[in-house]
Amino acid sequence: MALMADSSEWKSVRRGRGGARKGKLSQLEKTQAPESVDRERDKRRITEAINELKCEDFWPEWKEIFSGCLAETVDKTVEGTDCIMECICYGLGNFSSCVSARYQLAMLLLLLEALQIHVGWCSLYDPVFTVSECETLRELGFAVLIENEEGKRAVCHPTLFYLMHCGKALYNNLLWKNWSPQILPKVTIIGNSFLGIQERMLQRELERDYRFLSDVTNVCEETSLPCSQRFLDVFNDTALIRFPLNKLHQLPKSMWDEPSEPQYEHCQDLEIIQRVKEPK
Ligand SMILES: C[S@@+](CC[C@H](N)C(=O)[O-])C[C@H]1O[C@@H](n2cnc3c(N)ncnc32)[C@H](O)[C@@H]1O
């Protein structure tokens, strides 16, 4: 089964003739391995989630905000990689068993379509993904990363990061890896509001543990993304975050000097899963 968008609706497209009626297993499904039946079910649920989100009043608002953002970030007039946008999604969670993660995945597919980013240009990683979830994502056309980057991905062309309800260290690592006024404008984040994080934390702890997040919060551009009461758990505190060059220049020059890699020695609760260290 593949997911296909026509102008109005996402459809589950069953290959071959006929389809299973609700609640009954088709002949095909009876002969399929249980994992592949699970994946078919997951893809059906993702399609349903997409169609539900499309009926929400906040979806056209998101679409408008994003179309404006893409027009500003991606330079269609140049040749080469600056005219396309890549997407990286970290920390989606178990979308097969968790409804919030499933709606977030559905939203990701809608956004890619709206922004005309090819699904194959979107890579995902979450250390909790099951083998079956990785397979479902591949069947949907995504690239699944196999390495835990801890968010430390160096950007070289415009990149959209989709980090829904992720740990602060993931944002901080991403900022550290791209800590330069030339590179940060290429980074666009959909994730937890940085201002919200700042409000909920003691300033001295934010500065000590998440220096890059702390330094950039007052010079980034945040557009909060609306959502309905029904989807509060799924999309609350979500914002589109960008780093315009003219604002980054407000930071003292010394702030950009040789940033040292975050260590998180004092963090009691790091909220992210770190890479397994190679034995020396
Ligand atoms: C608070 S959960 C959010 C899950 C889901 N997005 C939601 O809103 O329900 C944070 C997610 O980040 C993932 N995560 C932790 N460390 C990570 C890493 N190094 N790279 C990518 N994702 C990571 C966790 O496995 C978890 O699924």
Image (tube, rainbow, N blue to C red):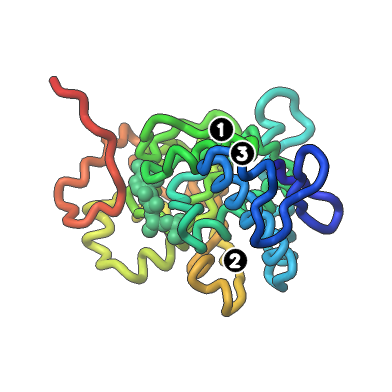
* Left or right: residue 35 compared with residue 117: left
At 51% from the left and 32% from the top, the residue drawn is 155
Mark drawn on residue 31: 3
Q: Nearer the viewer, residue 235 or 203?
A: 235
Indicate the position of residue 57 as horizontal and vertical percent values: 72, 73
Indicate the position of residue 135 as horizontal and vertical percent values: 53, 36
At 64% from the left and 40% from the top, the residue drawn is 140
**Residue receiving disc 1:** 143
- Kindly tell me whether residue 219 is visible in this rendering: no
Is the residue at mark 3 in contact range of ligand 1, meaning its CB lies under 8 Å from it?
Answer: no
Alpha carbons under labels 3 and 2: distance apart: 44 Å
Indicate the position of residue 195 as horizontal and vertical percent values: 43, 65
Amino acid type of disc 3? Thr
Is the residue at mark 2 in contact range of ligand 1, meaning its CB lies under 8 Å from it?
Answer: no
Alpha carbons under labels 2 and 1: distance apart: 26 Å
* Residue 146 in which image quadrant: top left
CB-based contact (under 8 Å), mark 2 and mark 1: no
**Residue receiving disc 2:** 225
